[in-house]
Amino acid sequence: MEVIDLALTFRTERGPLRVLDGVSFSLQPGRTVALVGESGCGKSVTSLAVMGLLPPSATVTGTIRLEGREIAELPPDQRRKLRGGDLAMIFQEPMTSLNPAFTVGEQVAEALRLHRGLSGDAAMMAAVRMLESVRIPEAGRRARQYPHQLSGGMRQRVMIAMALACEPRVLIADEPTTALDVTVQAQILTLLDEMRARTGAATLLITHDLGVVADHADQVVVMYAGRVAESGPAAQVLGTPQHPYTVGLLGAAPRLDGERGGRLATVEGTVPDLANPPPGCRFAPRCPFRIPVCDTQPPLFEVGPDHRSACHRAPLDQLLEAA
């Protein structure tokens, strides 16, 4: 999948609100791109734009190509046929995404009926196999239960089974381990890696957890206030960050070798109000390296092989050494 210059504007009582501005990235088969940034930076709304799940008040421009086919301008009925088939999503909170009125087996089977043309019995049998594949014990019995009868980890596994039932070309996982304990988080992420390797799906992983990014992502896209701040191979972005915002995020992550009892570093300030964003670089009001040219919007500078940073002062190596 290719996403090129994606922009999103909502009609609001305050006037047009531009929440995405020129977002670009690509997803390759069998590989994972992590979309990271603070809450309010545009990660989840990017995924909803790709999925075509935005309300009528939204206006989307730019290019979204799935295997070379432009899908952003498809009629609603054709876009709907892609969802659950070639394009699937694991939502952030399964309890609000699963239908409480239907058993989990029926909900997994629905995708198989709609997109694979299976009959009722065949779809249910395939749904049970999918629940087994995501390591739900006693899958046949669990398939007859309702979402409220399952634990949070079980519900998340059901969401993964639903998303992967039709072996999608692209899988979007929006904070798939939110509110799960660390042991279950590790199991879910390992499961996603195994399923991706088996099906060859391209994965977009949305997360706040840079530890998860380091362990599971091939590429990283750092977003800030609706724009891409930095992008590149995970090892480069996390090992030699070239945008002050990325540096701040990494500095705020807890470390095992940190000073015991010491205060965690923070990125001072908050994400700006997109109804009235600052001119130029949107991170400039919070940036310790700000200079006058930051009042103009920086392009994405090439700072390494496939590594780009939207900072006038990139590469930052000398600045970081001096700091």
Image: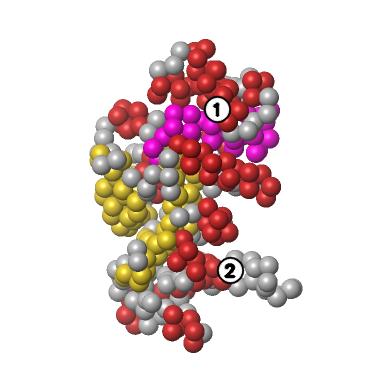
Q: Nearer the viewer, residue 202 or 85?
A: 202
* Residue with the most extreme right position: 261
Residue under pointer 2: 252
What's the magenta bit mostly, secondary-structure-wise?
helix
Badge 2 or badge 1: first in the primary sequence:
1
Residue under pointer 1: 130
Give residue 293's position: percent from left, percent from top. Answer: 32, 80
Task: Please tell me which residue is depicted at 56% across the width and 71% down the height of the picture.
Answer: 251
Question: Few, some or many C-alpha atoms within 10 Å of disc 2 (few <14, some 14-19, many ≥20)?
Answer: some
Identify the element where label 2 is drawn. helix
Quadrant into which the N terminus falls = top left
Give residue 184's position: percent from left, percent from top. Answer: 66, 44
Q: Which residues are magenta?
A: 147-170
Q: Mark 2 is on which residue type?
A: Ala
Residue 238 in the image: above or below residue 102 = below
Give residue 89's position: percent from left, percent from top. Answer: 46, 38
Q: Mark 1 is on which residue type?
A: Met
Between disc 2 and disc 1, the foreground one is: 1
| Residue 165 on the magenta span | yes
Identify the element where label 1 is drawn. helix
